[in-house]
Image: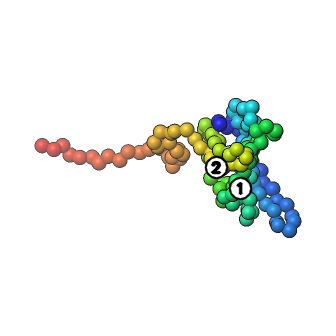
Amino acid sequence: MEIKSYYVGSHRQRNASNYQRRWISLVPKTPTSTVQNIVIYFFVGETITNDTDIGYVTPTTTKFVVAYAPISDFADMYHILQSEKPVHFYWYADTANKVQWFQITTNEEPIGEGPRDQTGSFSPVFEAKEDII
């Protein structure tokens, strides 16, 4: 599903578990009848990010895909959203609406695609040679 835009946020709450998280909310370019909202929650030290629970979908009610990830994944996913276009979000949920995997990805790009060199203009180096007889 191609992503049109996104929102990011950070949340901290004082309580016994010292709750902290970040999130990225993705806006689909073309929402469907079962998916209109996507959010990835990034948790610090939470058991929610273990392999048995990485999210859920609500295709018949709120039409959300909700994914969970460790906070260590936030920077990489955020960087893709900031620097690439187009960006896609893919996932798979089982028949119990439990997310089994998800990814943020780009389209195929040509070799050498990347940040532009900002160090200055290109200056080729040539050596002057005397004519060879």
> Would residue 70 be seen by someone viewing this image from the given angle?
no
Query: Residue 131 at what x, y percent from top left?
Result: 18, 43
Earlier sequence position, callout 2 versus callout 1:
1
Q: Residue 86 got which mark?
A: none
Between 11 and 68, which is closer to the camera in this rendering? Answer: 68
Query: Residue 86 at what x, y percent from top left?
Result: 61, 37
Residue found 81% across the figure and 62% down from its top = 19
Point out the residue furthest to the front here. Answer: 95
Query: Is residue 129 left or right of 36 when viewed as pictured?
Result: left
Q: Secondary structure at mark 2?
A: strand
Q: Residue 53 got which mark?
A: 1
> Would residue 36 be seen by someone viewing this image from the given angle?
yes
Task: Identify residue for label 2.
Answer: 101
User: The C terminus is located in which quarter?
Assistant: top left
Crowding around mark 1 (Cα neighbors within 10 Å: few <14, some 14 to 19, many 20+) is some
Q: Mark 1 is on which residue type?
A: Asp
Crowding around mark 2 (Cα neighbors within 10 Å: few <14, some 14 to 19, many 20+) is some
